[in-house]
Image (tube, helix red, strand yellow):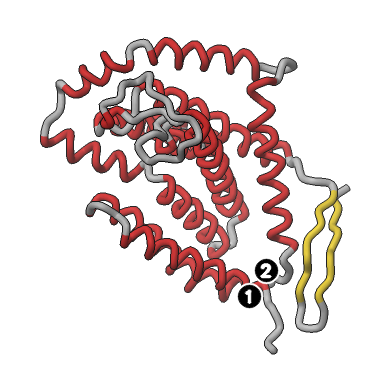
């Protein structure tokens, strides 16, 4: 029997991802939905071809302890995302009150905003907002993070490798947070005709998962990281402008109410700041436990930082 190897584990993970991408492609309803799938699939293929030899040469994955460190980092960041809104020592609670007020205020005008946006529809805006929706696809963002991370490995650039990590972590946190809230609230999408006040909590129906907007949350998470990492403030302005346009596109396409977009933007900003702050502060779990598999033995490694 062939011994397990971390590179084999990575190859298996990529195989699972490839199978998922094929499933996503076969179930896509339009060419618009095909685009991000093609782009992400191409990204995965290129990174697999280019970075695995480098990883093998440099022993980047010489043990599965790396997986333990990544999981530990994400767990710490997830706890911070959950704790920040109720934090009374900093500005967390104040931010929660401001966001709650903004969402409540916007929700009272959801129907009016939908009608106003519906009145400006045209062929040009249809095409432009299609592009905006594609740009905000959470899967595309994960592919972008992987590309930056892989590029950092190939270029031997710790800066871009860490940037890729922060982008990926921010996107994962935003996606996970919005998924939980979508399921818990079960708000009807505008195109159902049920009205902005229609909720079906924990029904897990595609037409009842409007609040908050995952496209917007993921886009603002990416924008937050890019703006914080960029030396030129114009890059940050451009990133936030792009994220805001993604939110507008979701309203224009009748996928979300305006208040869904407002809450999504706030969640994305929070997740981006948490990921950036975690890396900037140099936080790390003092101890981590992970399995280590080699050709000779299978062990459990306990690593510590002092």
Q: Residue furthest bottom?
A: 1
Cα separation, mark 2 vs mark 1, equals: 7 Å
Tag of residue 13: none
Where does residue 175 sit, x and y in percent of width and height?
A: 51, 41
Question: Tag 2: Cα neighbours inside 10 Å, few (<14), some, or many (≥20)?
Answer: some
**30 horizontally vs 172: left or right:** left
Where does residue 18 sit, x and y in percent of width and height?
A: 44, 67
- For the question of whether residue 296 can be seen, the reply is yes
Mark 2 and mark 1 residues within 8 Å of each other at the beta carbon: yes
Tag of residue 61: 2
Q: In the structure shown, which secondary structural element does the residue marked by tag 2 occupy?
A: loop
- For the question of whether residue 227 can be seen, the reply is no
Where does residue 207 sit, x and y in percent of width and height?
A: 35, 36
Q: Considering depth in this image, is 306 or 70 the residue closer to the camera?
A: 70
Label 2 or label 1, whichever comes before in sequence order: 1
* Residue at the image position 41 percent from the left and 28 percent from the top: 187
Please determine whether, in this image, residue 267 is positioned above or below residue 10: above
Please determine whether, in this image, residue 146 is positioned above or below residue 242: below
**19 horizontally vs 253: left or right:** right
Could you say which quadrant of the image residue 98 lies in? top right
**121 horizontally vs 210: left or right:** left
Residue with the mark numbered 1: 56
Please state, as top left, top right, bottom left or bottom right, where the N terminus lies in the image: bottom right
* Residue at the image position 24 percent from the left and 41 percent from the top: 130
* Residue at the image position 37 percent from the left and 65 percent from the top: 22
Question: Tag 1: Cα neighbours inside 10 Å, few (<14), some, or many (≥20)?
Answer: few
Please determine whether, in this image, residue 282 is positioned above or below residue 99: below
Where does residue 14 sit, x and y in percent of width and height?
A: 51, 67
């Amino acid at each position: 029997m062939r011994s397990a190897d971390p590179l084999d584990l990575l190859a298996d993970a990529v195989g699972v991802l490839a199978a998922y991408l094929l499933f996503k492609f076969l179930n896509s309803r339009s060419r618009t939905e095909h685009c991000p799938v093609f782009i992400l699939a191409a990204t995965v293929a290129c990174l697999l071809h280019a970075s695995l030899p480098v990883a093998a040469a440099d022993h980047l994955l010489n043990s599965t302890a790396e997986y333990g460190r990544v999981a530990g980092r994400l767990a710490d960041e997830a706890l911070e995302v959950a704790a920040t809104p109720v934090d009374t020592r900093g500005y967390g609670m104040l931010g929660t009150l401001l966001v709650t007020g903004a969402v409540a205020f916007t929700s009272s005008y959801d129907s009016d905003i939908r009608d106003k946006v519906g009145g400006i529809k045209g062929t040009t805006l249809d095409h432009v907002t299609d592009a905006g929706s594609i740009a905000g696809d959470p899967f595309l963002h994960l592919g972008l993070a992987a590309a930056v991370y892989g590029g950092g490995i190939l270029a031997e650039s710790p800066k871009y490798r860490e940037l890729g990590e922060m982008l990926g972590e921010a996107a994962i946190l935003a996606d996970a947070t919005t998924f939980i809230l979508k399921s818990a609230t079960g708000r009807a999408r505008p195109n159902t005709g049920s009205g902005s006040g229609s909720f079906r909590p924990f029904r897990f129906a595609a037409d009842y998962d409007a609040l908050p907007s995952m496209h917007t949350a993921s886009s603002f998470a990416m924008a937050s990281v890019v703006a914080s990492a960029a030396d030129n403030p114009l890059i940050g302005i451009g990133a936030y402008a792009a994220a805001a346009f993604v939110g507008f596109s979701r309203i224009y396409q009748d996928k979300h109410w305006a208040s869904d977009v407002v809450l999504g933007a706030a969640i994305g900003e929070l997740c981006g700041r948490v990921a950036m702050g975690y890396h900037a502060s140099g936080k790390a779990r003092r101890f981590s436990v992970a399995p280590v598999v080699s050709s000779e033995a299978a062990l459990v490694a306990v690593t510590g930082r002092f």
